[in-house]
Amino acid sequence: MTLNRSGAYAALPGGILDGVQEATFCTWVKVNSHSGWARLFDCGTGTDKYLFLAPKAEGSGLRFAITVAGNGAEQVINAPELATGVWTHDAVTLNGTTGILYVGVLEAGRNSAMSQTPASLGCSPLIYIAKSQWNAHYLSGQVDDFRIYNQGIKCF
């Protein structure tokens, strides 16, 4: 799927993450250019309960975040920003209280104090590829082979 930051995104059916305690999100992505807070994926029930993966968050690099109380209460995993113009395989695993962010086959970031899970977001969250819950922050690039697993596994 090619995305140009002007409103192109994909929406997945709600309910995919209902009751999911451990999860893996993985995809291939080629970022054309960075804009603050663009999303590889974003899942939630609005701007207070969500999880997302951004290739370059403002003021930092690649970021996975999950919260049930808004952006001031996010549990995050940070890593260097994704390179532009090249394909990378990116994954986030949530297993128990440990979240790991992978770029390629290498661990790029870790948080061993993740108490929130996809199930914490509530029933039937909205799931977007290349768009955020804020109806903004569209990705400029390409996304391929987006997958969600209901267990914390390596998917490469």
Image (cartoon, rainbow, N blue to C red):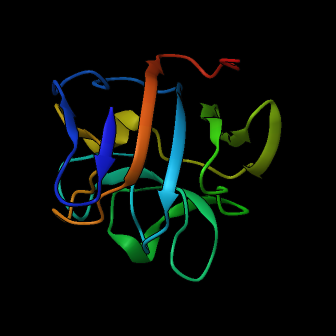
In the foreground, 135 or 145: 145
Q: Quadrant of residue 60?
A: bottom right
Q: Quadrant of the N terminus?
A: top left
Residue sticking out furthest to the bottom: 59
The structure residue drawn at horizontal position 72% and vertical position 41%, both measured from the top left corner, is 103
Image coordinates of residue 61 in percent, x first then y, are: 64, 68
Q: Residue at x 57, y 59 (%)?
A: 63
Q: Relative to 25, is 12 on the left or the right?
A: left
Total number of numbered labels? 0
State left or right for residue 98 relative to residue 144: right
Q: Nearer the viewer, residue 58 or 124?
A: 58
Foreground residue among 92 and 106: 106
Q: Answer whether residue 130 is visible to the viewer in this image.
A: no
Q: Is residue 36 left or right of residue 111?
A: left
Q: Report which quarter residue 121 is drawn in.
A: top left
Residue at the (48%, 65%) spot, across then down: 74
* Quadrant assignment for the C terminus: top right
Q: Is residue 2 shown above or below 149?
A: below
State whether residue 132 appears in this view. yes
Residue at 47% of width from left, 27% of height from top? 21
Whole-percent x and y of residue 37? 41, 68
Q: Position of residue 154 (x, y in %)?
A: 70, 20
Compare residues 46 and 40 and report the one nearer the observer. Answer: 40
Location of residue 138 in the rendering, given as x and y in whole percent from the top left corner: 29, 59
